[in-house]
Image (tube, helix red, strand yellow):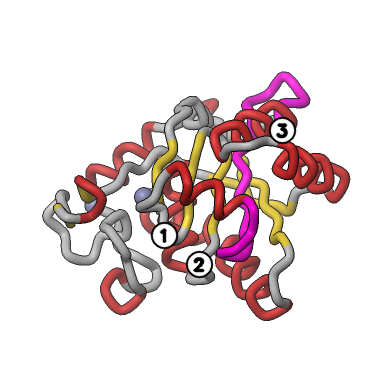
């Protein structure tokens, strides 16, 4: 069952796993992911998300699918299908993996500007182990959009130098908790659990 908030608002469910990372990278990524709901609470008061590890039997299924599918888009489609096992909204999935992993290579083949991570539908792959980049990707899962254009050549389109949705955000620039511009706060406040529909790849 999806978690329902007062007023009938549905929280965004985000599952995750780390894939063949060093113990240190896995620990850092997990800590950043687990911290995300409290970040959301601080930047957008009516948005809610829940984060939890993906069950290990599902992890194995999805790892198999990633090995089998030839493209990132197909990996995402297969993943979303496997996560949709009840009548509730499809949860999103964050996979933290190595930058040489099969999934990262597929993502960069299809989206050469996806230097740190990529998203397609319900699936986010992050292959650069930095909390700010992980949170940037996770904000996409809540409905936030990039504040840059043209592969990063036009940046900070919201007019805020410290917005986390800029190209290549860093903690020194966006802070912790990070700043999120009003346009994106409104997007994620307005969003239910229905942001997994896009089948295009966007980058981190
Ligand atoms: Zn912005
Ligand atoms: Zn982005």
Q: Nearer the viewer, residue 103 or 10?
A: 103
Verify CB contact (< 8 Å) between mark 1 and mark 3. no
**Residue name at image x 56 percent, y 36 percent:** 122
Disc with the residue nearer the chain's start (2 vs 3): 3
Please tell me whether the stretch drawn in magenta is mainly helix, strand or loop: loop
Q: Which residues are magenta?
A: 83-102
Please give the residue where the numbered disc 3 appears in the rendered image. Answer: 83
Disc with the residue nearer the chain's start (1 vs 3): 3
Q: Quadrant of residue 162?
A: bottom left
In the displayed structure image, the side of residue 94 where residue 150 appears, left or right: left
Residue 175 % position (x, y) = 33, 73
In the displayed structure image, the side of residue 194 where residue 87 appears, left or right: right
Disc with the residue nearer the chain's start (2 vs 1): 1
**Residue name at image x 16 percent, y 59 percent:** 160
**Residue name at image x 73 percent, y 53 percent:** 53
Please give the residue where the numbered disc 1 appears in the rendered image. Answer: 115
* In the depicted structure, whether residue 64 falls above or below residue 7: below
Does the stretch in magenta take in 96? yes
């Amino acid at each position: 069952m999806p978690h329902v908030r007062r007023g009938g608002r549905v929280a965004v469910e985000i599952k995750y796993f780390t894939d063949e990372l060093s113990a240190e990278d896995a620990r850092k990524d997990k800590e950043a992911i687990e911290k995300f709901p409290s970040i959301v609470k601080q930047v957008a008061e009516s948005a809610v998300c829940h984060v939890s590890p993906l069950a290990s039997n599902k992890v194995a299924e999805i790892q198999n699918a990633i090995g089998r599918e030839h493209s990132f888009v197909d990996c995402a489609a297969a993943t979303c299908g496997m996560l949709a096992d009840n009548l509730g909204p499809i949860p999103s999935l964050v996979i933290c993996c190595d930058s040489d992993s099969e999934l990262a290579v597929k993502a960069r083949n299809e989206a050469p500007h996806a230097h740190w991570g990529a998203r397609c539908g319900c699936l986010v792959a992050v292959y650069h182990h930095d909390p700010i980049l992980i949170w940037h990707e996770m904000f996409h899962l809540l409905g936030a959009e990039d504040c840059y254009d043209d592969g990063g050549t036009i940046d900070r389109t919201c007019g805020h130098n410290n917005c986390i949705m800029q190209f290549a955000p860093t903690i020194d620039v966006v802070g912790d908790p990070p700043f999120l511009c009003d346009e994106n706060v409104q997007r994620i406040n307005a969003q239910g659990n229905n942001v997994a529909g896009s089948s295009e790849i966007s980058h981190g």
